[in-house]
Image: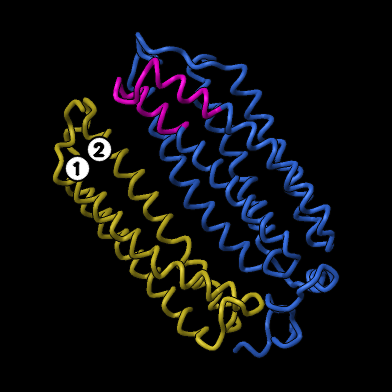
Amino acid sequence: MTRLRKLSLLQWFGLFAAAGIWLAQHGIGQGMAEARCSAAGGGISNDAVQIVLMIVAGVVILAAEAASVVVFRATSDASYHSPPPVGRMRMIAIATMSTNLIFLVIILLDGIASILDVACRNS
Amino acid sequence: MTDYIFGGRREGEVPRTHEGRNPRDVSHLASQRLGVPVAWWGIAMLVASEATLMFTFIGTYYYLRSKTPVWPPVGDPEPHVVVPLILAGVLATTSLPMQLASMAARAGRLVATRRLIVLALIVQCGYISYEMWDYQHELQTTTPSHDAYESIYYVLLGADHGHVWIGILLNVWLLAKLGRGLTMYRLNATIAVTWYWHFVNLLTLFVIGTLTSATLL
């Protein structure tokens, strides 16, 4: 695999990983909370599930951030005006270095709110 | 690392965004492109984030609906169906002139590009004018604070109208830029705005379909 292709894969990972893992955390978290609050869900610890989801999601996002930084540094001799794929990689790396941090905050808020709130009560 | 790029060509052999400052050069250089411009990726990321926002609203609508036995709740008016669906369809047709404008810009046909954008803009302005009147008319009978149904109804519809407004402002800005000629930057802008309108038109169909489902289903 060429270095350019490896960088391209890192760039795509940096772009999609955060959104994908937040989708998984939110979806699985809501599903587990609904199951916990069902008649047969007494054995599920909602807090434990939310903590695990938050940690896994946080690790993935930190990896995505690292991938974005690697691509940004590797394309330091280019600009987003450069021809494809280098221009595209640099532009997306610049954008995802910010958005991955935003997603990290979203995941922490999602997990902490789920833990601090009472799972099974009427809204 | 940047010496050879995709397709085995050297960086100096590939057209740059700042080259091409008249329609003929733009047309020639656009035909030499290896892939979509960076502006396309930029608008793709914008569309992805806006789609996330809007689909969380749509998800909220269906979540509330799934928890409510009667929908809309008793006392809330059922949404109109025929006029909103027809208007959403009319708005969706503006994707055609916008796409044709994008293709005309690639071919260096500046006058055709401007005319097609103006055509799309007239229809889009007509749509948003009626919708603004209808929105404020509905606010005189019910308010977003009335209940969860009205809240999500006005949020979903208002957010969609907001996206239409942004698209209209982008079209006006684009026409102002194209009024001074065609460059590679303005070609990229035309491509980006066209894709934004494809997204807004599809989004409007989803939103109106969601809201009218309360009456239809």
Q: Which type of secondary structure does the marked residue at label 2 adopt? A: helix
> In this rendering, would B144 be left or right of A84?
left
Q: Amino acid at mark 2?
A: Ala
Q: Which type of secondary structure does the marked residue at label 1 adopt? A: helix
Percent coordinates x, y for residue A49 in the rendering? 23, 48
Q: Amino acid at mark 1?
A: Asn
Determine if the magenta segment contains residue A66: no
- List the residue tagged with mark 1: A46
Label 2: chain letter:
A
Label 1: chain letter:
A
* Same-chain status of marks 1 and 2: yes
For the residue pair B107 and A3, the one nearer the viewer reads as: B107
Disc 2 crowd, CA 10 A, few/some/many (<14, 14-19, 20+): many
- List the residue tagged with mark 2: A33
Tell me, by letter, which chain the rendering colours yellow. Answer: A
Q: Which residues are magenta?
A: B131-157
Q: Residue at x 46, y 67 (%)?
A: A95
Tell me, by letter, which chain the rendering colours blue. Answer: B
Q: Residue at x 61, y 77 (%)?
A: A81
Main SS category, magenta section: helix
Question: Mark number for residue B16?
Answer: none
Q: CA distance from mark 1 to mark 2?
A: 6 Å
